Image: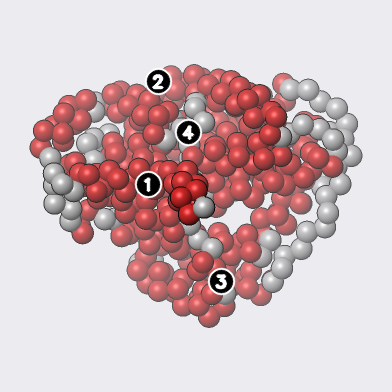
Amino acid sequence: MKINSVIQYIKNELVLFIAAILAILTSFFATPKLSYIDFKVLILLFNLMIVIAAFKEFNIMNYIASIFIKNCSSYKNLTIALLSICFFSSMIVTNDVSLITFVPLTLIICSSININPIKIIVLETIASNLGSALTPMGNPQNLFLYSYFNISPLEFFKITFPLTLLSLILLIIIALKGENYKLDVKVSKVTIKNKRLSIIFFVLFIIILLSVFHLINYKIVFVMTIITTVIFDKKLLIKIDYSLLITFVAFFIFIGNISSIETIRIFISNILNNGLNTYIGGIISSQFISNVPATMLLSGFTDYYKELLLSVNIGGLGTLIASLASVISYKLYSKEFSNESTTYLKKFTKYNFIFLIILTPIIYLLIL
């Protein structure tokens, strides 16, 4: 029984397990240093995860979703409403949290009106992955690159806005080209659980965003986040994803170790010696190891941060593991429709590669 539990844990935290193994193995060839760990990224991630956990706890996201959906009278309206929620919310609460929140809601709504949600969920996944590309806090790879290369907020948005705008246009076109029929969507009344605490944590969220954009010292905000959470809702401290933070620590050590091995550093740096190679390398490597590890791996060997930033966000399209957030949708759908998991994968792959094939050349030719 214990062995089965360990195996299941490894399956659930496969990226963490691989990162830890890589960090340990490379430590035999290079001495790990505390300086390899970017504590600023870890603190910003921790702060954001606290307020996001609060938003989920107090039902804020479902409340906003209910406002969007309650007036939907057709399949197209419902699709566009759900895609919009995922697309825009992911910019603030990250792509994985957006999917964890809104895919179950989609399953409930579609079940109540007796339609298969497969296409909507596939497009929601794409919407969350691409919408999150806009902001530094939209996904872990953005936050890491934003901090690692010390990109200014204005420059960051100049890089990501065209990709986000083009992605939104493509999503709307695909949603409008699909089938359409009348629906009678009934959404249960959703209320915010604790308005006083919701306001407190919303204010904290604004303060955290100010620290992300370098307007307040992130260390001061970290202390404020801890104090606020301990005073008002200590339960939030056990609801954040510590495995993600530990995964980052392991990758920091792994990358630091291999960067200090001269032959490896020179070899990879020679491959990523121009913008095009970095762009292609980010997209291809994301398909096999997912975009967050690809970001952390390649960042230490290239100065072409603009190409890397765009490539790992576009690289989240394609295979199921290109973005680990995509696995969330797959698991949630497969749990409800276990006999249709293969159909889901086929449709997921089809739409993801459509977006990948369209966006890859356009972004490079028009923006880079």
- Sequence-wise first label, 2 or 3: 3
Dot 4 alpha-carbon crowd within 10 angstroms: few under 14, some 14 to 19, many 20 or more: some
Residue under pointer 3: 235
Residue under pointer 1: 17
Numbered badge on residue 365: 2
- Circle 3: residue type: Lys
Q: Are marks 2 and 3 in contact (CB under 8 Å)?
A: no
Name which quarter of the figure residue 296 lies in. Answer: top left
Choose mark 2 or mark 3, whichever is in front: 3
Residue found at x 40% / y 29%? 288
- Sequence-wise first label, 4 or 2: 4
Residue 280 percent across, percent down from the top left:
34, 24
- Circle 1: residue type: Phe
Question: For numbered disc 3, what is the local secondary structure?
Answer: helix
Q: Could you say which is closer to the camera, residue 335 or residue 272?
A: 335
Residue 217 percent across, percent down from the top left:
35, 67
Residue found at x 33% / y 59%? 40
Dot 3 alpha-carbon crowd within 10 angstroms: few under 14, some 14 to 19, many 20 or more: few
Choose mark 1 or mark 4, whichever is in front: 1
How far apart are the alpha carbons under marks 1 and 3? 26 Å
Residue found at x 66% / y 55%? 61
